[in-house]
Image (spheres, grey):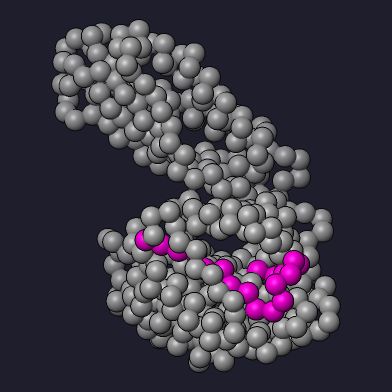
Amino acid sequence: MLDRTIRILSDLIAFPTVSSDSNLEMIAYLADRLEAAGAKVDVLSDPVGSKANLFATLGPEIDCGIVLSGHSDVVPVTDQAWSTDPFKMVERDGRLFGRGTCDMKGFIAATIAMAPVFAEKIRHRPLHFAFTYDEETGCIGAGHLAKELKQRALRPSAAIIGEPTEMRIIEGHKGCYEYTTRFQGLEGHGSIPDQGVNAVEYAVRYVARLLDLKNELRSKAPPRSRFEPPWTTINVGALNGGTVHNVIAPKAQVDWEMRPVQVSDAIFVKEDLKRYCREVLLPEMQKIHPNADITTEIIGEVDGLVPVDHNEARQIVSELTGANGADLVSFGTEAGIFQNLGMDVVVCGPGSIEQAHKADEYLERDQLAQCLKLLERLADKCAAPALG
């Protein structure tokens, strides 16, 4: 089974599914494999038809199913110093090299390799496969999939998100909210600054407010928070604007994010910034230039995975792996989207996040073998009249 999985992984790596490009060829490949195993497969196109989610089911079409989920997209390889072709998998010293090997095509390959086994054993409880697009750029595909599942009134009860955790059980992570805030000022000569609206200056003041909020959030950490750090964080990723030294900058842009440990923190930050712009920055800007403006584009607002006392997915994976306890991680996943649909969710998959997004990304062969053991035990569990 391991060799078969590695062959499938090699096929998946050959699809250059960078988020800026289409994933349709890879989705078609996965659909063919799952249909051959007897699954009912739906390919769900994005609004423009260049990408798609895949949702497939083995077993009865009833509620209370288990979802195995992964994203099909990968991050770019531009300006990275790879020692081999990133889209041609290479095995060396027990490691499988290629873009997406650990993040997260290794898990997808394992589920596809196991599909015929699942088809043979599943009887009483459905198993679903959910493969999404554009996780790396705001979990857009998972958001669209969630809307589709709501419309179908389909209610799976548990989900395993196969992000690279070194097969540790992860029961919680922070949310990831990403924004681009744009400033429209008024161009002018640098020698007469009062006759223009310098967008860069107002962007800098906005960033200063972000930094004030960043410090204030430290005091809002929930009691006994297990996250590291335990409070909501803010990061300013980029500030761009202006052209040359002696021209008042008419435009500026701030790219920033926050990682909330609780939704109330995100609300606090957004409301504070809206009030600051409305009551302080905009009146000053528009006093000089009525058409001056500040707009914020939501790049993505992905809720975190909230640890809960009762979690069937955690119980299932614990029984299958023999692991005691569950951890939290700092990176984000699509898990919160599935949790918001009413499922119990854990993140558990092969590989280490330390290798993700880097040149010469790799997945340990042993990690893939451990993932297959979990899935093989899940197949045996699915053969029983009841699971839980």
Q: Quadrant of the C terminus?
A: bottom right
Horizontal placement of 243 versus 62: left or right? left
Q: Position of residue 129 (x, y in %)?
A: 59, 72
Near-viewer residue (28 or 259): 28
Question: Is 23 located above or below residue 382 in the figure?
Answer: above
Determine the residue positioned at 36% across, 64% down: 22
Q: Position of residue 124 (x, y in %)?
A: 78, 79
Q: Position of residue 52 (x, y in %)?
A: 45, 63
Determine the residue positioned at 15% across, 21% down: 246
Horizontal placement of 347 versus 383: left or right? left
Quadrant of res 154: bottom right
Q: From where the camera sits, is residue 106 visible? A: no
Determine the residue positioned at 59% across, 76% down: 40
Question: Is 53 located above or below residue 223 in the figure?
Answer: below
Q: Position of residue 337 (x, y in %)?
A: 61, 53
Q: Confirm whether the magenta stretch covers residue 111.
A: no
Near-viewer residue (166 or 374): 374
Question: Is 240 located above or below residue 338 in the figure?
Answer: above
Quadrant of res 69: bottom right
Quadrant of res 77: bottom left
- The magenta span reads 50-67
Q: From where the camera sits, is residue 22 visible? A: yes
Question: Is 308 located above or below residue 208 in the figure?
Answer: below
Q: Confirm whether the magenta stretch covers residue 57.
A: yes
Q: How many marks?
A: 0
Determine the residue positioned at 36% across, 78% down: 14
Q: Quadrant of the N terminus?
A: bottom right
